[in-house]
Amino acid sequence: MKIYTRTGDDGTTGLFGGPRVLKHAPRIEAYGSIDELNSWLGMCRSARLPDGADAVLEQLQCDLFAMGAELASPHPEGTGLTLLGASEVARLEAAIDRLETLVLPLKNFILPGGSSAAAHLHVARCVCRRAERAMSALHEQEPIREFLLQYVNRVSDLLFVMARAANATEGRADTEWHATRGGGA
């Protein structure tokens, strides 16, 4: 089977179990952003991560693939694509709680960066927030399961804490943000 079909040469793509839509449609933007996040998580996994983080990210990648499949269908219930549920959110929350034991409590905003792993995780967090915005826009036009919005919100929390834990594991302090004082540049 060839990878190219030429069916998308006109700027459309087919939804799973549904019609063809423009490649810039809100549904495509939503699952495309989830796909981009999944790729960034693969990049994060190539860095030195805190103990157990690689396994968490691998499971997260599997979950995001399932989420992308659900978002790629206008009728996921009818196609058996509602694969994620409350137990996945609970799993994310447990991972967040475990990782928070590795870091000091936040007293200020922090700047993204630090170790290579932390910097990659912060980029992934920002991509996750963009995916969340795309999913919210889609939900406004075509309702999706609210659980998906809850899940992706929790993912960004996890990536934030994981970035902080990556810095802590490397012995690097988070860089606190301080408002610029005195007239700027």
Image (spheres, rainbow, N blue to C red):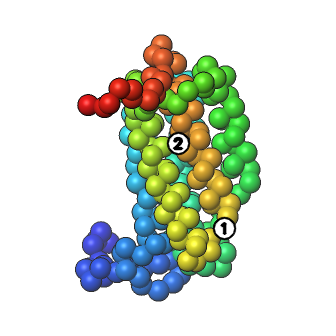
The numbered mark at residue 145 is 1
Quarter of the image with the C terminus in it = top left
Q: Secondary structure at mark 1?
A: loop
Residue at 62 percent across and 74 percent down: it is 143
Category of crowding for the residue at label 2, using alpha-carbon neighbours closer than 10 angstroms: few (below 14), some (14–19), many (at least 20):
some
Q: Amino acid at mark 1?
A: Arg
Q: Is residue 2 above or below residue 99?
A: below
The numbered mark at residue 175 is none
* Residue 137 in view: yes
Q: Amino acid at mark 2?
A: Glu
Circle count: 2
Q: Secondary structure at mark 2?
A: helix
Q: Decide which of tag 1 and tag 2 comes sooner along the chain.
A: 2
Residue at 42 percent across and 84 percent down: it is 20
Residue 114 in the figure: left or right of residue 146: left
Residue at 57 percent across and 32 percent down: it is 161
Alpha carbon of mark 1 to alpha carbon of mark 2: how far? 23 Å
In the rendered image, the residue lying farthest to the front is 183
Q: Closer to the camera, 36 or 178?
A: 178
* Residue 48 in view: no
Q: Is residue 31 above or below residue 124?
A: below
Category of crowding for the residue at label 1, using alpha-carbon neighbours closer than 10 angstroms: few (below 14), some (14–19), many (at least 20):
few
Image coordinates of residue 134 in percent, x first then y, are 49, 63
Quarter of the image with the N terminus in it = bottom left
Image coordinates of residue 50 in percent, x first then y, are 53, 24
Residue at 63 percent across and 53 percent down: it is 151
Name the front one of labels 1 and 2: 1
Dot 1 and dot 2 residues touching (CB under 8 Å): no
Q: Give the residue number, with chain letter if any, for mark 2.
A: 58
Image coordinates of residue 15 in percent, x first then y, are 47, 78
In the rendered image, the residue lying farthest to the top is 171
